[in-house]
Image: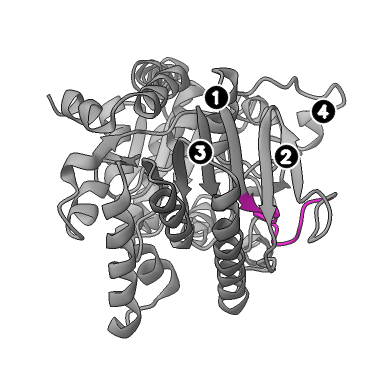
Amino acid sequence: MKVCIFTNHFYPEDFKVNDVAFELVRRGMDVTVLTAVPDYPKGRFFDGYSLTKRRREEVNGVHVIRIPIIPRGRGGAFRLVLNYLSYYFCLRVFTFFHSFRHKYDRVFVHLTSPFFVGVCAKKMARRQRIPMIFWTLDLWPESLMSAGGVSNPLIIKPQIRMVRKVYEQCAQILIGSKGFEKSICEKGDFKDKLVYFPNWAEDIKDAVPEDFDIRAIRPYDEKEAFVILFAGNLGEAQNLDAVIAAADCLKDSKQIKFVFVGDGRRKEHLERMVREKGLSDTVYFTGRYPINTMPVFMQRSDVLLFSLKDKPCFNLTVPSKVQFYMAQGKPVLAMINGDGAQLIREARCGLTVSAGDTEALVQAVRRMAAMDRTGLEALGNNGKEFYLKNFKKELRMNQLVELLENNPSAILQDDNR
């Protein structure tokens, strides 16, 4: 089977679609990925890549074709618009010619913002008369309204029509959060196309580098410290200003330490907040590290922290970080609303407070810091057991292969029963 994957991001960027593409090849499929020159999250092209270098390559058996883009830079609104539109127009032109020269059996879409990649995929699926499987990890135009602050009906209504037309072309629409159902069905009669397809934790196979010494990154006594770790993108959506405010309230509790592993457009702002508030002994920024080192950081921490702003599109989302945290067998502390908070409560793997509620976060940190080791370990074990039962990668890959290989409508009928 020949599968064409449309995605804004692909290896060496760190997204779940990497697992999908590599696993489909491992199971005997011929996979081509149409993606952009990698620039996420730093906003500049990865080393070794440019508008002229490594535009076509093979990665673990996957044929990768990289479409030129204008890099997102620091992520300001103007540069993001240029980044999105450059990818859309270049991909649309490329797809038109590519679809006549190369025949596929399935189109698979990995959707993160913006939605335009779905328009190009729809045109190929319709032109070649093949099924399109659409994996939506972001709601559009809701994310445009929430993250971009766009509310003008002259902009939003055409976006809704665009989304509706793409959904109409889909054989199935995979959703990582059950909360997506309401938004999607408001745009049309798509309920029978929906398939629950939650995230899984990263499959880390690479060994930790021999010269990696986490002790050099931790300028405090680990035996005395209660470490709260945030790992991932330090962006606007994560609402980390509220976390720093909580750390400020807790700075007199000398054993409590907040550690941020990652990078993003808000990192410099957050570091400035820490300096201004005199939190250098409470809050630490390590910078970005490879994914294979994350379990080392997490096993040397007491609690794993997650936060998002109170926005409709975020409240309906269960980001993959939640499953990754669960898989580490550590307690989770989340400052979020909606489906993500509900999942943590259902798994009984930690504590949740409302998005942006700094006072409640402070109380939750104090409560967890006061727990004995047995209580913390019980929360962590609950999360890992829940992950293995519901989110293990093998379960999702088996489900996806079945969707690709069998009659889509028949699978949906079986799932609905």
Measured from the top left, where is residue 302 in percent x and y?
53, 29
Q: Is residue 184 above or below residue 371?
A: below
Q: Mark 2 points at which residue?
A: 289
| Three-letter amino acid code at the position of disc 1 | Met
Callout 3 secondary element: loop
Q: Mark 4 points at which residue?
A: 212
Badge number at residue 104: 3
Residue density around tag 4, few if under 14, some if 14–19, many if 20 or more, within 10 Å: few
Earlier sequence position, callout 2 versus callout 4: 4
Measured from the top left, where is residue 206 in percent x and y?
72, 22
Measured from the top left, where is residue 406 in percent x and y?
33, 24
Q: In this view, does 52 lie to the left or right of 308?
A: right
**Separation (CA) of disc 3 from disc 2:** 37 Å
Residue density around tag 3, few if under 14, some if 14–19, many if 20 or more, within 10 Å: some
Q: Do the residues under discs 1 and 3 have CB atoms within 8 angstroms?
A: no
Q: Mark 1 points at which residue?
A: 29
Instruction: Classify residue 235 by image quadrant.
Output: bottom right
**Separation (CA) of disc 2 from disc 4:** 10 Å
**Separation (CA) of disc 1 from disc 3:** 11 Å
Callout 1 secondary element: loop
Is residue 195 shown to the viewer in this render?
Answer: yes
Disc number lying in front (1 or 3): 3
Earlier sequence position, callout 3 versus callout 2: 3
| Three-letter amino acid code at the position of disc 2 | Tyr
